[in-house]
Amino acid sequence: DVNGAALGEGRWGQARGLRNYVYLTVGTGIGGGAVIEGELLHGLVHPEMGHMWVRRHPDDEFAGSCPYHRDCLEGLAAGPALAARWSRPGHELPDDHPAWALEAYYLAQAVCNLVVVLSPERVILGGGILHRPGLLAMIRTGTRDLLAGYVRASAVTDEIEQFIVRPGLGEHSGALGALALALDERA
């Protein structure tokens, strides 16, 4: 569960010492965990960040792959959406394929939504899709461009490389988050 990954990153990774941050994973689905004032965000249900609505790219005619919403973030940007849109999985697409600019377009919107709604101190982007060389840089640029100076914080202007980051714990964020939960229960 991505909440575990968020906790792991808060305890030992990229969010260590922060009280407000978001972990978003992009792979076979899109999920997110938010820590607000040091606590996981819970409400009616757990946050379903992958199902937020994003503005469709004007050149994107793909209907979307989410069985509930079709063209929510997950339906447009998760691994199955990449495979369905381009007739082959993302790992088979070359680095210069137009898929990656489209992916960055949707993920940058998601980060912008998280920034204006939750005001995190850091956004951590993980999952298999984020292994694509250059994608994180495109998301950072897209986020800064979309925010268009509205959020006047150096984190999203001059220091965006430290604001939108990869998981410090790599693929171990979730497992270490489960360990963090167990340690906290034991204490």
Image: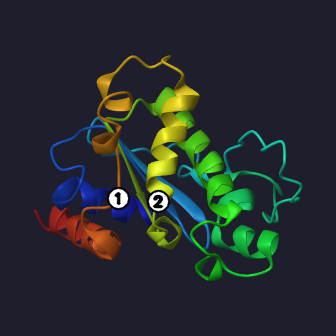
- Identify the residue at the far left of this view: 187
In the drawing, does residue 158 fall left or right of residue 85? left
* Front residue (pair 95, 75): 95
Q: Is residue 119 above or below residue 108?
A: above
Residue flagged by tag 2: what amino acid is it?
Answer: Gly
Residue flagged by tag 1: what amino acid is it?
Answer: Arg
Residue under the point 33% across and 40% down = 163
**Residue 66, percent from left and from top:** 78, 63
Which of the labelled discs sits on residue 166, or is there none? Answer: 1
Q: N-terminal of the two: label 1 or label 2? A: 2
**Residue 56, percent from left and from top:** 79, 44
Residue under the point 34% across and 57% down = 6
Residue under the point 74% across and 82% down = 88
Which of the labelled discs sits on residue 134, or is there none? Answer: 2
Secondary element under disc 2, as helix, strand or loop, is loop
Kindly tell me whether residue 41 is visible in this rendering: yes
**Residue 7, percent from left and from top:** 29, 58
